[in-house]
Amino acid sequence: MELDILEIQKIIPHRFPFLMIDRVTDCRPNEKLIALKNVSINEQHFVGHFPNEKVMPGVLIIEAMAQAGCIYFYYSKNMQGKELIYYLAKVTAKFYAPVVPGDQIRIEVETVKMLPKVGFLKTKAFVLDKLVADAEIGFGIKEV
């Protein structure tokens, strides 16, 4: 299954400038998800974050991984849009290389542990085939 930005916006309540995922290229519930984030020089954080040497903030890479995890969680739990998925915990996170304008981040998500209302996912971020970050992230569901 693939998702474009319009389909992603039906799942994630975030909008510009906080929507970080541009496309989902592969989504297999309870198995894996692959999402893409295009890094543009026009993104607002580059104005003040290392303005002379543009580097994407690590917290925004984690946010992109969390949003990809949210989409994975949504489909793995067969949700119908009547719930919100909340980021509960960053269990671990590591950064291995800088991400700069012009890069495309490929995010891979897989299950660590899934419970009825809570899940823990392993996420990895790559630029080309180089691992730039990984994190284990916890999610929870709230009925709305």
Image (cartoon, rainbow, N blue to C red):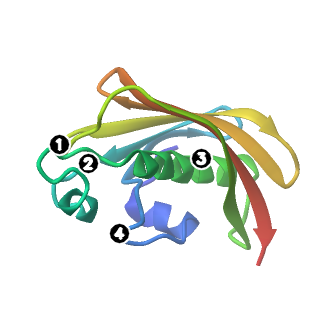
Q: Position of residue 140 (x, y in %)?
A: 76, 57
1 and 4 marks in contact (CB < 8 Å): no
Q: Residue at x 78, y 68 (%)?
A: 142
What residue does disc 4 label?
A: 17
- Image position, residue 69 (x, y; %): 59, 47
Mark 2 vs 1: CB contact within 8 A: yes
Pointer 3 residue: 69
Circle nearer the N terminus (4, 2): 4
Residue farthest to the right, as pictured: 116
Marks 2 and 1 sit apart, C-alpha to C-alpha, by: 6 Å
The three-letter amino acid code for the residue at tag 4 is Pro
Q: Looking at the picture, which amino acid does disc 2 mark?
A: Val
- Disc with the residue nearer the chain's start (1 vs 3): 3
**Residue 102: numbered disc:** 1
Q: Earlier in the sequence, mark 1 or mark 4?
A: 4
Mark drawn on residue 125: none
Q: Quadrant of the C terminus?
A: bottom right
Residue 9, compared with residue 27, is above or below; it is below
Q: Position of residue 103 (x, y in %)?
A: 23, 39
Seen as rendered, the residue at the extreme bottom is 144
Left or right: residue 67 versus residue 129 is right
For marks 2 and 3, give the CA distance: 19 Å
User: What mark, if any, has residue 39 been given in the picture?
Assistant: 2
Q: Position of residue 92 (x, y in %)?
A: 63, 35
Element on which disc 3 rests: helix
SS for tag 1?
loop
Label 4 and label 2: CA atoms lie apart by: 12 Å
Is mark 1 in CB contact (under 8 Å) with mark 3? no
User: What residue occupies the far top of the structure in this picture?
Assistant: 129
Q: As displayed, is residue 141 above or below residue 98?
A: below
Of marks 4 and 3, the one in the foreground = 4
For the residue marked with disc 1, what is the amino acid?
Answer: Gly
